[in-house]
Image (spheres, rainbow, N blue to C red):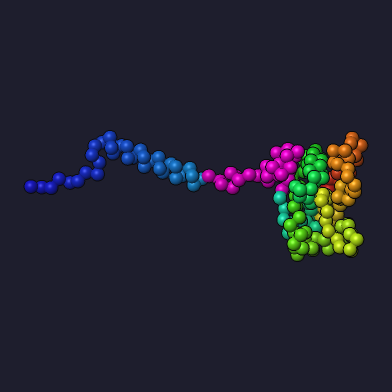
Amino acid sequence: MKKEKKKFFKNKIQMVSYIIIFIICIILFIVIGSIDYDKLEESDAVKFNNLYSNVSKDNVYHFATSTDVLNIIQGRSGIVLFGFPENEWTKYYAYYLNEVAKENNIQEINYYDFLRDRENSNGTYETIITHLSNYVPTNDLGNQNIQAPTILIVKNGNILLYLDDLSIIKGNIKPESYFDESTINNLMEKLRTALDNYKGV
């Protein structure tokens, strides 16, 4: 007697079911493989908004490292906001700088949270201080350190603006008291003039 060949499928319905499952697996494999996981990560703008909720989610901030900032100072062009979330004054510079930048179609502002680098005397941070020594304030002990908040605008290595007015305000004045209509207008005008020069207007 001849042995019957063992069938892979008991019937046609089972065969069709397995084929459908196989096709679905292939489709899922292709879809999962084509996902751009980088895009699923939060953008810098969203991350910045999480730190500074007063700044819109469609802001132009890019998180920069000390090396990024040093490269700008050493001959490139860029706008840098030095600050850190723990400093309550930084959010005001962050807001007004973003507003003026968007008015002027500026695509990117570099945000450098320098606090840890300053505390650890990071070598690149110290080199930044050296390049900005004519602008960075000196304390009573003769040490120079960038203070928060500070705005730096550089074009082809030339410093167009180094603004740290808020970092040297003394006393118990609160930001909400300091920023009246006149103060805001003066700050916005300074920023507009600097950005006009930056754009070559």
Instruction: Tell me where residue 104 appears, x and y as whole percent.
Output: 80, 40
The structure residue drawn at horizontal position 71% and vertical position 41%, both measured from the top left corner, is 49
Instruction: Tell me where residue 53 appears, x and y as whole percent.
Output: 73, 39
**Residue 71 seen from this side:** no
Seen from this angle, which residue lies furthest left? 1
Quadrant in which residue 18 is drawn: top left
81 and 113: which is toward the camera = 113
In which quadrant will I find the C terminus? Answer: top right
Q: Is residue 19 magenta?
A: no
Instruction: Tell me where residue 101 appears, x and y as whole percent.
Output: 79, 42
Instruction: Tell me where residue 50 appears, x and y as whole percent.
Output: 69, 42
Q: Is residue 47 magenta?
A: yes
Q: Which residues are magenta?
A: 35-62
Number of residue marks: 0
134 and 19: which is toward the camera = 134
Is 39 on the left or on the right of 126, as rendered?
A: left
The structure residue drawn at horizontal position 82% and vertical position 49%, both measured from the top left corner, is 149
The structure residue drawn at horizontal position 78% and vertical position 50%, both measured from the top left corner, is 83
Quadrant in which residue 121 is drawn: bottom right
201 and 112: which is toward the camera = 112
Is 9 on the left or on the right of 102, as rendered?
A: left
**Residue 129 seen from this side:** yes
The structure residue drawn at horizontal position 91% and vertical position 61%, both measured from the top left corner, is 140
